[in-house]
Amino acid sequence: MSALIEVSDLRVTYGAQPIVDGVDLTIERGEALGLAGESGCGKTTTALALMKLLPASLKQSGEIVLHPPKSDEPINVHKRTEAGMRMIRWRHISLIFQGAMNSLDPVQRVDAQIAEAIRLHAMGGGSEAVQARIDELLATVGLTSALGHRYPHELSGGQRQRVMIALALACSPSLVIADEPTTALDVVMQAQVLRLLERLREELGLALILISHDLGVLAETCDRIAIMYAGRIVESGPVGAVFDDPQHPYTRRLLDSLPVIGGERGVAPPILGQPPDPGDPPGGCAFHPRCPYAKERCSAEQPDLRQLAPRHQSACHFAPWSEWPTVETSVVGIDTAVAGEEGP
Amino acid sequence: MSVTSASAEVATAALAGEGLDEHGIRYKLLHTWRGRFGIGVLGLFLFLAVFGSLIAPDDPNASSLDVLASPSFAHPLGTTEQGADVFSQLLVGARVSIVVGFAAAFISAVLGSTVGLVGGYFGGWTDRLLDGLENWFLVIPTLPLMIVLARLLDPSLGVLIVVIGFTSWAGTGRIVRAQVFTLRERAFVERARALGAKDSYIIRTHILPNTMPLIFANTVLIVAVAILSEAALAFLGLGDPTRISWGTMLENAFNSGAPSAGAWWYVIPPGLCITLLVLAVSLLGYLFEEHVNPRLREANA
Amino acid sequence: MSGRWLAGKAGAAMLTLIFVIIFNFFLFRVMGDPTTQLARLPNSSPEEIEKLRADYGIDKPLSGQFLDYAGDTVRLDFGVSQRSREEVWDEMKAALPWTLLLVGTGTVLATLIGSWMGVIAATRRGKKTDDSLLGFSLLTYAAPEYWIGIILILVFAVAAPILPAGQQVTPGVEFSSWISEALSVAEHMILPVTAMTLMLLGQYFLIMRSSMVDVLTEDFITVKRAIGLSHEQVIRRHAVPNALLPLVTLSAIQFGAVVGGAITIETVFSWPGLGELSFNAINDKDFPVLAGTFLVFSAGVILANLAADILYFFLDPRVQAR
């Protein structure tokens, strides 16, 4: 397997405030990477930065190198001009937004919107060929071509989401970024969409970046997962490894906060406090104000992302964690003490 | 020349500044160029409205043989077709615009709020009727309506104030009604009712205080409309014949052929004053509206 | 179904118009007894007045009078002008096309220029261009349109006499063909239409700007850029068409102002439309004419609102689903 896209030291700032604070990512061909974290941690910004779609008020730096499957020439996305980007977008990387309510132009018919993408990248040929391709795409996502002739408001939410998927596949990209694709859907539709994405991945060899705050969704669909906090990746690794053996307090706490059927009764311990204000970040490790395991070092020094196992990384001073000391929480969820060992 | 709530919203959102949300209204009034310009210019014209006749160098009604003369030392803005001093007329004319503008807007506010409150609070057929009345006034072109009424009643200052106030209330009515609708369903009103409070009490202590800021902001904008309306009516010959206003100055200038005579000193200043005053009042009005309407501020964030 | 919605709108329009007629009736028959106005004219003898009272049916009960009035209105009998002794309807019929010409041209230009300005301001939001355009639109709102008209005359017809100062054609000239007459009208139209356009510009600009700003925040705009369209293509193909929809209905709030502007601008330029007719009627206290023009102006605005509703219905695919 060879790398499809390599991201090095991606940074996005709003004036002086960092939104994405040094992110490194590598995605293999056909791999599904999950990007998890609370709202405002920088997941969506990272995704948009890959396609250089950020508004002008946000400044972006860092390297993004794309290795398209059928070519030997790597594409230096970070160096491309806007005109150059227009050729890459959708053709190599495409995007599915959360809640396709407003992702489609309300006054344009669905098939016209797909046709627009196809024609823009000269993928179609004559109008018959384009129409055939549209029908093929719609069929792939389980929609009829009659539905394609309608306006977006005439379709249900689930149908619109599937249209977005069809649209995302229109130019046969090698990477699809799905930003909270299931958040606005009910559980049944959520399962359908996820299964669809998996099937498409298998059939078309698509790589996928799946952004979600729902760890369950990510666990189901992804090969690897990266946990983001305050604009940085704090842990990344294979999905099984990260979920079974988390190596960062934030990940540990996220997993703790998930209720488990058949597990212990009681209030799931929340992660207290608020995500940091990008204009006023805490010194040292960004998570330390909310971390029950924090020590003095954590407020002074920012931890780097370190390799723990072949593909498992964590940005915590005290990783690797072989076991997690229990944290006592009272009924109202206030940490009272850290019982057990002091650190690893 | 009607400003409905929709266009005021649009204008306010467009003209709203950024980053002022944390500040109170005093800051906005005193520290933005809009606020300063508005207060400064309005203050100036308010001063003239009161003291204009005292500081005017000449009797504005005095005629002389020096007809349509261009500016000179004696007459810094030249003379009218009657030979009167344009500058003096200009100073004195502020009073009519200010008085009619504010008085008519006040009447409009009272009328509009009453209709909006009664209809919005009591609902049912009362509201249907009042809403229909409101919509009628909103659709009907205001200037022709004002012309018809003013002509019928023989124009004077009082008639103008009543006519303008009586035709401009519908915009306020609609805003108040919408606000009352939302307030009516709020918890504190339901609680008050459950405790047995009378309607008049609820309206007085709960509904009205939460609506007053909205009414105030909207009324300031109506002042601008009223000033323009008075000027237009005066220009068309329906101004108070016993008083000098900027509108009547333009009327006289036009009717006596000042434009063709090239008498720019007679024609430009009155219109300029109207423009400046309306500008100042509008800027203040948009400032108030933006301050009062949290939704607008959110939309600009 | 769409038919019912249309019928509802048309019905509401009809009802509004009926109330205008009722209003007119009360105003002019009950409050302003026309015979008292007539009595001011020289040469009216008591017998004439009595005859006119009978003609106007003032001796009948109120309901009877109203039915007469309504019936007359439907038959386009608005009485006789007190000044010219002509049929009011004939005078209005002759004046209407001129007003439509002025108002129509002004509205079209104001919509085009205003919308174009609005798109520019929205895409350069917060920058100098935006601020200047906003300031400009506020100025054109605050400045009385008749004053602007007078200034236009001063500059372009008096100081540098390149355009005519009034009327619709150069008086006293024999025109060799309809083309040369049309050209003369066009020449005379320039200044009044400029005044009208300037007056209406600001509102269309603000509406379009606001509409564009709203549209540009929508997700589908980002999607269109993600597909590979350039900024200009996205704005032209997707943002503007979506932004135009509210423009159609929101601009309906201007129709009343348009009428007001027509009256004052026609007065300034002696443009022979309904506005000038009203102006003369004001000075002459010619109530039949005032009543007639008020009705026609109101009907015009009501119809324009209805037309805007219908237009929006056909443009927005989402409305048709109702």
Image (tube, rainbow, N blue to C red):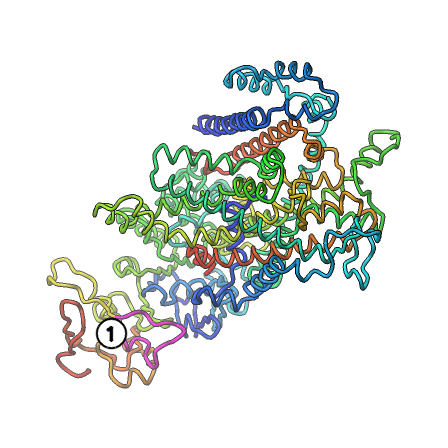
User: With B213 as the anchor, is C56 left or right in this view?
Assistant: right
Judged from the image, the secondary structure of the residue bearing numbered disc 1 is helix
Q: Is residue A81 visible?
A: no
Badge 1 amino acid = Pro
Residue C52 is inside the magenta segment: no
On-image quarter of the N terminus of chain A: bottom left
User: With C227 as the anchor, is B260 left or right in this view?
Assistant: right
Q: Nearer the viewer, residue B65 or A306?
A: B65
Residue B86: x %, y % from top left: 75, 55
- B167 versus B285 height, above or below: above
Residue C100: x %, y % from top left: 68, 33
On-image quarter of the C terminus of chain A: bottom left
- A321 versus A102 height, above or below: below
User: With A202 as the anchor, is B272 left or right in this view?
Assistant: right
Q: Residues within 10 Å of mark 1 (few under 14, many from 20)?
A: many
Q: What residue would you read off at disc 1?
A: A249
Q: Is residue C42 visible?
A: yes
Q: Nearer the viewer, residue C322 or B181?
A: B181
Residue C76: x %, y % from top left: 63, 20
Residue A274 is inside the magenta segment: yes
Q: Residue at x 58, y 37 (%)?
A: B141
The residue marked by circle 1 belongs to what chain?
A
The magenta segment is A273-290
Residue B296: x %, y % from top left: 45, 55
Q: Nearer the viewer, residue A226 or A29?
A: A226
- B128 versus B71 height, above or below: above
Predominant SS of the magenta segment: loop
User: With B122 as the anchor, is B101 left or right in this view?
Assistant: right
